[in-house]
Image (cartoon, rainbow, N blue to C red):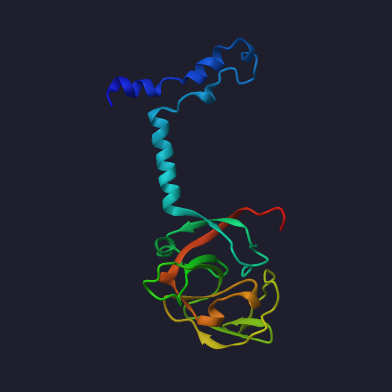
Amino acid sequence: MDVGCIMSLLRPSAIYNFVTSYPALRWMPCQSWGFLRWPGLDGFLRLMVVGLLWSTFSELRFIPSSSMFPTLRVGDRIIVEKFLQASYYIKNPSIHDIITFKDPTQIYGENTETVFIKRIVAKAGDAVEVHHGVLYVNGVAQQEDFIAQPPAYTIPLTTVPNDHVYVLGDNRNNSYDSHVWGPLPMKNIIGRYVTCYHRPTNI
């Protein structure tokens, strides 16, 4: 494409010329109609940079199950910060971080990758146990006002190994998590929950 063609692409569009010259539309508040201008090469470069950063460090996810109820509900759409392995070199995972991760029980090489979302309740070196409906971390009963109901199961005293975290769903009695398959390797972490940007109105 030669320079003439490129410059013609950057000129105001025919729609812009029509709107700004049509007498019946001159009275409208946005009289400059600047928002209809072609953004130009500089604008496109900025959009490309923003899009690249977004796709690199963030992703959108859909909640398919009730394992994190009531914090997250079926049908919620959320924003996840990706590449936590990189950010965790600076900041260790925090208790109560909600994370997405690869199923640790999935056999390597399977075609479909299963992704879960759970809450970190303990980190490497912590001692975890559950009995009488209460989660204990290092012997201290945890006050958890975000769970759906107290756990009906028990977990024997378990020490979280290095490079692992212990994760549980907020819907304790309807969640496939560390109380079933044990501590989660940090290498399985995909990202950290940031916010829910859409919740179906019928829920």
Residue that appears at 68% across and 66% down: 70
- In-image side of 27 versus 91 (left or right): right
Residue that appears at 62% across and 70% down: 67
66 versus 80 height, above or below: below
- Between residues 35 and 176, which one lies in front from this camera angle? 176
40 versus 31 height, above or below: below
Q: Quadrant where the N terminus lies?
A: top left
- Between residues 37 and 159, which one lies in front from this camera angle? 37
47 versus 21 height, above or below: below
Percent position (x, y) of residue 59? 49, 54
Residue that appears at 59% across and 63% down: 64
Q: How many marks?
A: 0
Q: Give the residue furthest to the front.
A: 111
Q: Quadrant where the C terminus lies?
A: bottom right
Percent position (x, y) of residue 87? 43, 61
Percent position (x, y) of residue 69? 66, 67
- In-image side of 142 versus 194 (left or right): right
Q: Give the residue furthest to the left.
A: 2
Quadrant housing residue 3: top left
Quadrant housing residue 49: top left
Residue that appears at 57% across and 56% down: 78
- In-image side of 91 versus 78 (left or right): left
Quadrant housing residue 88: bottom left
Q: Give the residue furthest to the bottom.
A: 156
Percent position (x, y) of residue 136? 61, 82
Q: Give the residue furthest to the top.
A: 23
75 versus 186 height, above or below: above
